Image: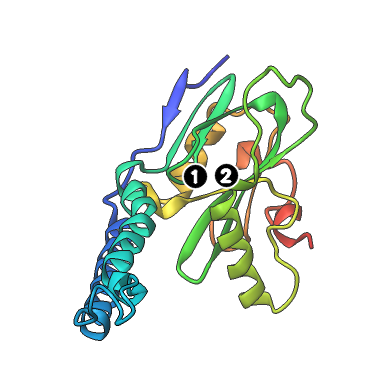
């Protein structure tokens, strides 16, 4: 089989993750300061001798801000991953699971671009063997849900990403979408349809199995 044995997209500088973390730190600090200003002077006990629940508000706010901040920090520490060989596509869309998707279970990969973001979409076919590789679940699809919301805002109707099972932000990786798709094409088997949104991302001619409007990208 021609082509490289394995490819891996090189990750770009985490501008997005750092931006989200910075905003969260600012908002969390504002919430904590507000709780201290409003409830910091509350006595620990009421006149009846019972515990004053309002006195716990600053500490409770601090715990809540820290708990919600855990996934924000993890998103910076556990960056997305896309790699592939002739057997499988390995994807980590966010900070949770890393999925190994055998090419035998994949029907199509496509590119969807809009509002400054570009997504790699993966559509799975029939799962032939439950013991072979992973399968995307609800918690793996947070990026796909973001792409769906974006497509609804752009088109004013059903999401253009309907029918896909997984999405990855291509902006998290170095290089152009054209180069990223070309790298996948070098290891993807012939049965996998590779498609892109017209005029935005070019698919290598050798891998075009149908016009690059991506029935997946326009299918509602």
Residue 134 at x, y = what percent?
62, 28
**Residue at horizontal 79 percent and vertical 63 percent from the top:** 220
Instruction: Describe residue 188's horizontal placement relative to residue 6 as left or right.
Output: right
Asked whether the beta carbons under mark 2 and mark 1 sit within 8 Å of each other, the answer is: yes
Kindly indicate the quadrant of the structure image that contains residue 43.
Answer: bottom left
Can residue 174 be seen from the camera position used here? no
**Residue at horizontal 57 percent and vertical 20 percent from the top:** 86
Q: Earlier in the sequence, mark 2 or mark 1?
A: 1
Q: Dot 2: few (<14), some (14–19), or many (≥20) neighbours within 10 Å?
A: many
Circle 2 or circle 1, nearest the eye: 2
Q: Which mark is residue 140?
A: 2
Give above or below for 174 relative to 1: below
Residue 150 at x, y = what percent?
58, 69
Can residue 144 be seen from the camera position used here? yes
Give above or below for 99 relative to 86: below
Residue 109 at x, y = what percent?
63, 42
Kindly indicate the quadrant of the structure image that contains residue 39.
Answer: bottom left
Give above or below for 112 relative to 43: above
Camera-nearest residue between 64 and 57? 57
- Which residue is under mark 1? 93
CA–CA distance between discs 2 and 1?
7 Å
Give above or below for 74 relative to 51: above
Which quadrant is home to the N terminus?
top right
SS class, disc 1? loop
- Residue at the bottom extreme, as displayed: 38
Camera-nearest residue between 37 and 220? 37
SS class, disc 2? helix
Q: Dot 1: few (<14), some (14–19), or many (≥20) neighbours within 10 Å?
A: many
Camera-nearest residue between 179 and 172? 172
């Amino acid at each position: 089989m021609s082509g490289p044995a394995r490819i891996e997209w090189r990750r770009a500088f985490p501008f997005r993750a750092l931006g989200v973390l910075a905003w969260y730190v600012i908002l969390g600090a504002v919430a904590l300061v507000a709780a201290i200003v409003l409830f910091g002077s509350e006595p620990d006990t009421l006149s009846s001798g019972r515990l004053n629940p309002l006195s716990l508000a600053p500490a409770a706010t601090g715990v809540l801000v820290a708990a919600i901040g855990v996934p924000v920090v993890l998103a910076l520490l556990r960056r997305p991953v896309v790699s592939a060989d002739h057997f499988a596509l390995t994807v980590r869309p966010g900070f949770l699971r890393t999925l190994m998707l055998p090419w035998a279970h994949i029907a199509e990969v496509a590119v969807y671009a809009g509002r400054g973001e570009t997504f790699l979409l993966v559509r799975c076919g029939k799962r032939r063997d439950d013991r072979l590789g992973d399968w995307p679940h609800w918690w793996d699809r947070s990026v796909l849900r973001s792409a769906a919301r974006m497509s609804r805002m752009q088109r004013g109707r059903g999401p253009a990403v309907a029918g896909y099972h997984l999405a990855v932000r291509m902006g998290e990786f170095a290089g152009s979408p054209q180069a990223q798709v070309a790298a996948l094409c070098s290891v993807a088997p012939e049965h996998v349809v590779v498609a892109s949104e017209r005029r935005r991302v070019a698919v290598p001619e050798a891998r075009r199995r149908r016009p690059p409007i991506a029935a997946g990208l326009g299918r509602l």
